[in-house]
Image (cartoon, helix red, strand yellow):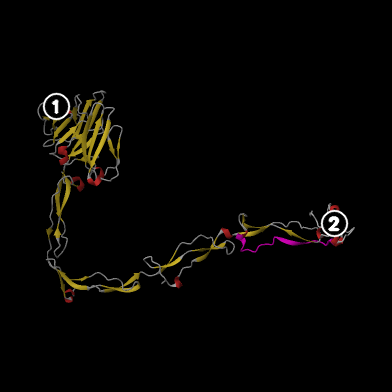
């Protein structure tokens, strides 16, 4: 249904062929009410029924879609109509245009897409020439050798039936009428083409055998048009195809020849071995029997070999996996190790222990990694703990990347010798000049802390003025 009155509801039903069940549907309802089938395939062929309803009533029309391999060369997209379905179905015109193939002799009924209760006149034209309804069953337009179509109006002019015998009926048929409620013009058309195809016998094929009992001839059958040009066979599949039976040929005894059985398996499962077969002189007779002859009967032909060398590939072999990541223990600057698995396998994939250890691929190798490109980085020495006498000083030692200088945990540099983090301070002896080196010496003296070496050195002057016995000195309460 191409063009209908406004405020209509549309319901499409598809009765597809059995092989279309389960196929992915690619049809959509367009705003005009038409059914749009995208990517048409064999799965889409079947009967499509459209029901249009509104407050007044409803109307139903059906059409048959047959899909073939390809469209006719140089033609538009058309839908061939089978003879059986054409005799029982009404072809509906549409405002977008419907194209069909009709075989001469088929009944051609074209319907105008209007509701059943439509009362206004429906006009028809053929190739832009008006068809006028007459009282006689059939009316002929034009005169002379090339006559127009013979037709009759049915169902109040809503359907036109065209005679497809003896006259020219192909062309463009169009109906038009006013819509009852809206007074808008409805126009729909159909383009009818004559189906001028048929099956034709071709040449005989070459005999399928030169001797024995299996030789046959077959005669080719081709789909051709009226000009005798062969077209694709799918274009004639709606026409009954003639049956061609094979004809026997070359039914005679074959010359004796050497025949061999199938080769045996290789005698070795790995490496070189031998395979063997049975070779005999035989003859295929015209009645189909195979007769075994003596070797002398085939002496004019070369004897087939009964054995030959073979090589078996079911040998155990080492199978190595891909190398793992370069994340092993560091062996030096930017050097570490990576590993992979190496397993002995048969050709069928089962593991075994028969592989030669001398051929085993390595499973560990050195690799380059930035994770090992590290070094110890030292800071400057801090000041000595004393200004004279024996003291010590320290510094910071960090494990860092050599390129970026980013600090790492110490265990990343464990394979490198770590520089010392402290050392003794070799400063001059304090005995050469005895003087106080801190302002707190009076407190040290009062608290009697001169017995401690550190305070004795820093407050040498104060502590040497009145030297008390160490045994009489109280225990310190704090250290400056």
Q: Quadrant of the N terminus?
A: top left
* SS of the residue under disc 2: loop
> For residue 127, what is the image quadrant?
top left
Per the model, the C-alpha gap separating discs 2 and 1 is 145 Å
- Read off the magenta span: 411-430
Say whether residue 75 is visible: no
Question: Measured from the top left, where is residue 143 in percent x and y?
Answer: 11, 30
Question: Measured from the top left, where is residue 281 in percent x and y?
Answer: 18, 73
Is 231 on the left-hand or right-hand side of 418? left
Q: To which residue does mark 1 refer?
A: 133
Q: Is residue 425 magenta?
A: yes
Say which of 64 and 144 sits in front: 64
Q: To which residue does mark 2 refer?
A: 448
* SS of the residue under disc 1: loop
Q: Residue at x 70, y 60 (%)?
A: 421
Say whether residue 125 is visible: yes
Q: Nearer the viewer, mark 2 or mark 1?
A: 2
Q: Is residue 327 magenta?
A: no
Say which of 445 and 416 sits in front: 445
Is residue 452 depicted above or below 114 in this figure? below
């Amino acid at each position: 249904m191409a063009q209908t009155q406004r405020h209509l509801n549309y319901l499409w039903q598809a009765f597809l062929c059995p092989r279309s069940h389960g196929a992915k549907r690619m049809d959509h309802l367009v705003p005009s009410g038409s059914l749009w089938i995208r990517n048409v395939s064999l799965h889409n062929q079947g009967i499509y029924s459209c029901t249009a309803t509104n407050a007044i009533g409803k109307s139903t029309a059906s059409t048959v879609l047959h899909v073939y391999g390809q469209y006719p060369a140089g033609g538009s997209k058309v839908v061939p109509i089978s003879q059986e379905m054409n005799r029982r179905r009404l072809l509906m015109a549409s405002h977008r245009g419907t194209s069909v193939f009709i075989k001469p002799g088929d009944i051609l009924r074209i319907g105008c897409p209007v509701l059943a209760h439509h009362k206004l006149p429906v006009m028809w034209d053929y190739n832009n020439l008006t068809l006028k309804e007459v009282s006689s069953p059939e009316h002929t337009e034009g005169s002379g050798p090339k006559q127009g179509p013979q037709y009759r109006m049915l169902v109040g002019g809503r359907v036109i039936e065209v005679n497809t015998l003896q006259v020219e009926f192909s062309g463009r048929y169009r109906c038009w009428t006013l819509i009852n409620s809206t007074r808008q013009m409805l126009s729909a058309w159909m383009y009818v083409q004559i189906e001028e195809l048929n099956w034709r016998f071709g040449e005989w094929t070459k005999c399928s055998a030169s001797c024995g009992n299996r030789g046959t001839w077959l005669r080719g059958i081709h789909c051709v048009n009226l000009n005798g040009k062969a077209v694709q066979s799918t274009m004639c599949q709606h026409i009954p195809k003639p049956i061609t039976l094979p004809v026997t040929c070359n039914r005679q005894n074959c010359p004796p020849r050497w025949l061999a059985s199938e080769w045996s398996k290789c005698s070795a499962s790995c490496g070189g071995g031998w395979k063997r077969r049975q070779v005999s002189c035989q003859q295929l007779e015209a009645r189909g029997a195979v007769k075994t002859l003596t070797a002398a009967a085939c002496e004019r032909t070369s004897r087939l070999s009964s054995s030959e060398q073979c090589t078996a590939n079911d040998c155990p072999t080492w199978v190595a996996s891909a190398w793992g990541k370069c994340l092993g223990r560091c062996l030096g600057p930017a050097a570490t190790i990576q590993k992979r698995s190496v397993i002995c396998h048969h050709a069928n994939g089962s593991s075994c222990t028969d592989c030669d250890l001398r051929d085993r691929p390595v499973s560990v190798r050195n690799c380059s990694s930035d994770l090992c490109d590290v070094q110890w980085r030292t800071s400057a020495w801090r000041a000595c703990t004393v200004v004279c006498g024996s003291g010590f000083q320290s510094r910071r030692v960090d494990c860092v990347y050599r390129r970026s200088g980013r600090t790492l945990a110490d265990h990343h540099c464990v394979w490198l010798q770590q520089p010392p983090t402290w050392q003794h301070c070799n400063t001059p002896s304090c005995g050469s000049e005895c003087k106080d080196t801190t302002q707190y010496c009076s407190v040290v003296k009062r608290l009697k802390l001169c017995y401690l070496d550190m305070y004795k050195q820093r407050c040498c002057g104060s502590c040497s003025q009145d030297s008390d016995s160490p045994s009489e000195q109280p225990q310190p309460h704090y250290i400056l």
